[in-house]
Amino acid sequence: MKETELKLVIWPNKILTRKCKPVFVVDEKIRQILDEMYNIMVKKNGIGLAANQVGLDKRLIVIGLNDQIFKLVNPCIFKKEGSIKIVEGCLSFPGLEIEVKRAKRIWVSALNHKGEQIDIEATDLLAVVLQHEIDHINGITFISRIPFWKKIKISSNLRKLKRGKYELPK
């Protein structure tokens, strides 16, 4: 797979609001996609990226945080505890940062890049990033997790994104 095949998708692209399709076979092509997603995420200074953020209708996410790398296929949250509020950014919403309430601790089931079943228990920032990226593949963006009054506060930023008036992370 050539490095230029996948490109970052910016809101309001419709793929960001569609639930992605499951992956049934974790093969070399899926591993190449995960690697390319990871490279794009690192290049754009992100800590997480979902497949629909690069235009793919697949349940794939990658995360790079605190020297941990996750390349997950069909991730699913099966338990949540507590709550935490944290300011989040998103590569598909350049320049936008908003405080979102999430679960403080979560348990996730997924396949790794080898197709092996794994379970992850995550807290704090890792839990937030996992929730953010799993939301993406479920067609949910972080702006749908905030109250209406916060949406009004960021409406000018959203209008700029709709008009293509933003700078992509380098």
Image (tube, rainbow, N blue to C red):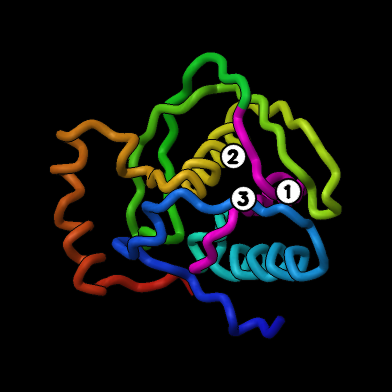
Mark 1 Cα within 10 Å, few/some/many (few <14, many 20+)?
some
Lateral position of residue 109 relative to residue 170, left or right: right
Q: Name the residue that disc number 3 marks.
A: 22
Q: Residue at x 50, y 60 (%)?
A: 52
| Mark found first going from the N terminus, 2 or 1 | 1
Q: Are marks 2 and 1 in contact (CB under 8 Å)?
A: yes
Magenta region, mostly helix, strand or loop? Answer: strand
| Mark found first going from the N terminus, 2 or 3 | 3
The x and y percentages for residue 22 are: 62, 50
The x and y percentages for residue 137 are: 51, 49
Q: Can residue 47 be seen by looking at this rendering?
A: no
In the drawing, what numbered circle is on residue 21? none
In the depicted view, which residue is nearer to us: 68 or 29? Answer: 29
Q: CA distance from mark 2 to mark 1?
A: 10 Å
Magenta residues, start to end: 55-77
Q: Quadrant of the N terminus?
A: bottom right
Q: Can residue 53 be seen by looking at this rendering?
A: yes
Q: Name the residue that disc number 2 marks.
A: 130
Decide: is 29 above or below 19.
below
Q: Quadrant of residue 158?
A: bottom left
Amino acid type at circle 1 is: Phe
Q: Are marks 2 and 3 in contact (CB under 8 Å)?
A: no
Amino acid type at circle 2 is: Leu
Q: Name the residue that disc number 1 marks.
A: 70
The x and y percentages for residue 114 are: 86, 53
Decide: is 69 above or below 53.
above
Lateral position of residue 44 relative to residue 101, left or right: right
Q: Are marks 1 and 3 in contact (CB under 8 Å)?
A: no
Q: CA distance from mark 2 to mark 3?
A: 17 Å
* Residue, far top: 82
